[in-house]
C-alpha cells in the first residue's frame, strides 16, 4: 500500500492493493484517524487508478457542519489511539466497500471520522452519508444474491477423463472473493471454476485458487444435462402465478444469457394465459344446474363449500341491487362490516365508492353491486379479523356464482374494482394499471371497465392518496359518460 502525501493542497493519496481489500482499508483508516487526518485531506485510490487525473474533480467535501480535528482519547498504557466504531457500521462498511462506486472509501472514512464525535450517527437514517452507505451495501447484497442464484455450471470432460464444471458470471460489483466461501461449501465435492471479467476462482476439491480475468469465450456454451433441466423448468412453470414485473425484478434480463432455461421464458410467458385457462378448465367443479334467480344464487352461495373460504364459518354475502341494472359493480370480497351485516359495500370502502359514484353522476341505487368472492377471507389477530386476499384458485372457483349473477342481471357494463374482481370476470390475471379506464368487450356483448378498489385508496399514505383518488374519479366519470352513450 502506498500513501504518500499529495503534492498539492496537502492531500494524502492512499492507493489500495486490491479493490475489494476491506482489511487494508481498515488498517489505513485506523492510521489516518489516529494521526488526526480529516477526510478532506485524504484521497482513496483503487489499483489502476492513475495519479494524473487526481484533480480532475474537486476532492470530496467535509460534511456541512465544520468539524475540527478529533482529539482521540488515549489508553492508560502505551498511549495508543482508541477508535470508536459500532458493529453495525463495520458490517455495512464491509459490504459497501465491495461496491464499484469509486468514492466509496472516501464515504467510509468520512463516516468513520464523524462517528468519533457522533457515536449514534449510524442510526440516523436521514443523514445523507448514512443513506448512501445503506444504498451501497444494499446493492452489493443484491449482487451477491444474484450470483448465488444465477451461476450455472456446465460440465467439461478434461483430457484425463475427469469432469470439471465451469460457469460464467458478470458481477456488478467486487463480490467474487466475498462469494467464494459460499460456493466452496455448497459444491465441496465438485471440481469447478467460476470465470468473470474481474477474475476467476478454481476449486479442485481441496484448494481454492484465484485466477486472472476471463472472457465469456472461455466458458462452455452448454452441456447434455441442460435439455433435461429445460424440460423440468417448463413443466413446473405455473402460468397462474406469473407476475412478469416481479419475475424481472428477481431475474433481470442481463442474467438471461447465462441461464439455459431463459430461452424458454418468452414462449412460456406468451402462452401463459392459454395454459392458465386450460388448468382452470381441467380443475372445474360441477356446480349442477345454473340458478334460476338471484334469490337462488343467494341460497346456493350460503351452502357452498367448494373452497376453503366457504368453509371458514363466515356468512356468505350475496349481491344486491336492481335485477335489471345496466351497471354491475364487482368488488373483491366482503369485508368485516359486510360479513357482519350480510350486505356488500357497507364498510369504509363502500362509503368511499358511493361518494365517488355520486360525484361522477352515477346513482348508487341503480347499480347491482356484488363481489368476485362471496365469503370473507381473514386472518384472526386477537379480537380483530384482518382482510386476507383470496387466491387465484378461490376466485376461479367462485366465478361460477359471479357468472350466474351476470347471466341473470345481464348488465350492459361491468365495473371491476381491482385485480381480483377483474379476474373473477375474465378468468385470467390482468394489470389494473394497464387496463383501467377503457372498455374491454366480453363474450356476452357487454363491456368490462377496470379501476382500482376503493380499499386500496384507503390504505395509501395521505401524500399520495389525493392523486390516486383523482385517477379513480376519472375512471368513474368515463364509465358515467359511457352509460350516457348507451342511453342508460
Image: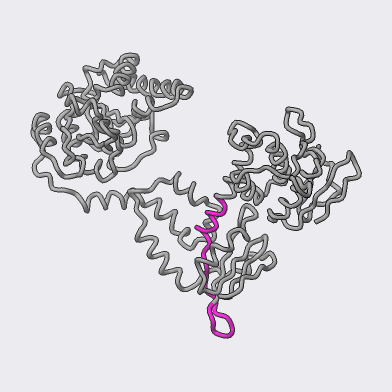
Q: Is residue 109 above or below residue 479?
A: below
Total count of labels: 0
- Reply yes or no: does residue 20 show up in magenta: no
Q: Is residue 468 above or below residue 261?
A: above
| Image location (x, y in percent) of residue 149 | 50, 57
Identify which residue is drawn at 69% across, 45% down.
104
Q: Which one is nearer the viewer's eye here, 369 or 88?
A: 88
Identify which residue is drawn at 58% across, 35% down.
123
Identify which residue is drawn at 71% across, 50% down.
26
| Image location (x, y in percent) of residue 440 | 33, 34
Question: Does any portion of residue 302 appear in the rendered image?
Answer: yes
- Reply yes or no: does residue 146 show up in magenta: yes
Q: Is residue 316 above or below residue 49?
A: above
Q: Which one is nearer the viewer's eye here, 89 or 387?
A: 89
Residue 435 lies in what quarter of the image? top left
Q: Which one is nearer the viewer's eye here, 224 or 426?
A: 224
Q: Quadrant of the C terminus?
A: top left
Q: Is residue 78 left or right of residue 284?
A: right
Q: Is residue 400 above or below residue 157?
A: above
Furthest-bottom residue in view? 160
Identify which residue is drawn at 57% across, 81% down.
158
| Image location (x, y in percent) of residue 282 | 22, 53
Furthest-front residue in view? 76
Furthest-right residue in view? 7
Question: Does any portion of residue 425 appear in the rendered image?
Answer: no
Q: Quadrant of the N terminus?
A: bottom right
Residue 107 lies in what quarter of the image? top right
Query: Which stretch is magenta?
Result: 142-163
Amino acid at each position: 500500500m502506498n500513501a504518500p502525501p499529495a503534492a498539492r493542497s496537502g492531500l494524502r493519496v492512499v492507493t489500495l492493493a486490491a479493490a475489494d481489500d476491506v482489511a487494508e482499508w481498515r488498517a489505513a483508516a485506523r492510521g489516518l484517524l489516529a494521526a488526526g487526518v480529516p477526510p478532506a485531506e485524504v484521497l482513496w485510490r483503487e489499483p489502476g487508478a492513475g495519479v494524473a487525473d487526481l484533480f480532475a474533480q474537486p476532492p470530496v467535501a467535509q460534511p456541512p457542519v465544520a468539524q475540527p480535528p478529533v482529539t482521540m482519547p488515549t489508553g492508560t498504557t502505551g498511549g495508543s489511539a482508541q477508535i470508536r466504531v459500532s458493529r453495525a457500521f463495520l458490517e455495512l462498511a464491509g459490504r459497501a466497500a465491495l461496491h464499484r462506486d469509486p468514492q466509496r472509501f472516501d464515504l467510509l472514512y468520512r463516516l468513520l471520522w464523524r462517528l468519533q464525535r457522533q457515536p449514534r450517527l449510524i442510526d440516523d437514517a436521514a443523514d445523507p452519508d448514512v443513506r448512501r452507505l445503506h444504498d451501497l451495501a444494499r446493492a452489493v447484497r443484491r449482487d451477491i444474491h444474484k450470483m448465488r442464484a444465477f451461476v450455472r455450471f456446465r460440465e467439461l470432460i478434461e483430457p484425463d477423463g475427469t469432469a470439471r464444471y465451469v460457469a460464467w458470471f458478470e458481477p456488478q460489483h467486487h463480490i467474487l472473493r466475498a462469494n467464494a466461501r459460499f460456493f466452496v461449501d455448497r459444491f465441496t465435492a465438485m471440481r469447478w471454476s467460476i470465470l468473470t471479467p474481474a477474475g476467476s476462482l478454481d476449486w479442485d476439491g481441496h484448494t481454492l485458487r484465484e485466477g486472472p480475468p476471463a472472457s465469456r469465450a472461455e466458458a462452455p456454451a452448454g452441456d447434455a444435462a441442460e435439455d433435461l433441466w429445460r424440460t423440468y423448468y417448463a413443466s413446473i412453470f405455473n402460468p397462474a402465478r406469473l407476475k412478469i414485473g416481479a419475475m424481472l425484478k428477481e431475474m433481470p434480463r442481463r442474467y438471461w444469457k447465462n441461464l439455459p432455461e431463459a430461452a424458454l421464458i418468452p414462449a412460456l410467458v406468451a402462452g401463459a394465459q392459454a395454459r392458465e385457462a386450460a388448468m382452470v378448465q381441467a380443475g372445474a367443479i360441477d356446480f349442477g344446474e345454473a340458478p334460476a334467480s338471484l334469490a337462488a344464487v343467494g341460497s346456493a352461495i350460503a351452502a357452498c363449500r367448494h373452497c376453503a373460504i366457504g368453509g371458514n364459518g363466515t356468512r356468505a354475502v350475496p349481491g344486491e341491487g336492481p335485477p335489471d341494472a345496466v351497471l354491475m359493480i364487482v368488488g373483491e370480497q366482503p369485508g368485516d362490516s359486510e360479513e357482519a351485516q350480510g350486505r356488500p359495500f357497507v364498510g369504509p370502502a363502500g362509503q368511499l365508492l358511493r361518494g365517488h359514484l355520486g360525484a361522477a353522476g352515477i346513482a348508487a341505487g341503480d347499480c347491482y353491486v356484488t363481489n368476485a368472492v362471496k365469503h370473507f377471507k381473514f386472518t384472526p389477530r386477537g379480537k380483530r379479523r384482518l382482510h386476507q386476499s383470496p387466491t387465484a384458485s378461490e376466485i376461479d372457483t367462485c366465478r361460477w356464482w359471479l357468472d350466474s349473477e351476470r347471466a341473470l342481471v345481464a348488465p350492459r357494463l361491468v365495473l371491476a374494482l381491482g385485480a381480483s374482481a377483474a379476474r373473477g370476470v375474465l378468468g385470467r390475471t390482468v394489470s389494473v394499471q394497464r387496463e383501467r379506464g377503457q372498455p374491454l368487450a366480453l363474450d356476452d356483448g357487454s363491456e368490462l371497465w377496470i379501476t382500482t378498489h376503493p380499499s386500496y385508496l384507503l390504505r395509501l399514505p395521505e401524500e399520495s392518496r389525493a392523486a390516486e383518488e383523482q385517477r379513480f374519479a376519472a375512471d368513474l366519470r368515463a364509465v358515467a359518460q359511457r352509460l350516457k352513450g348507451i342511453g342508460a
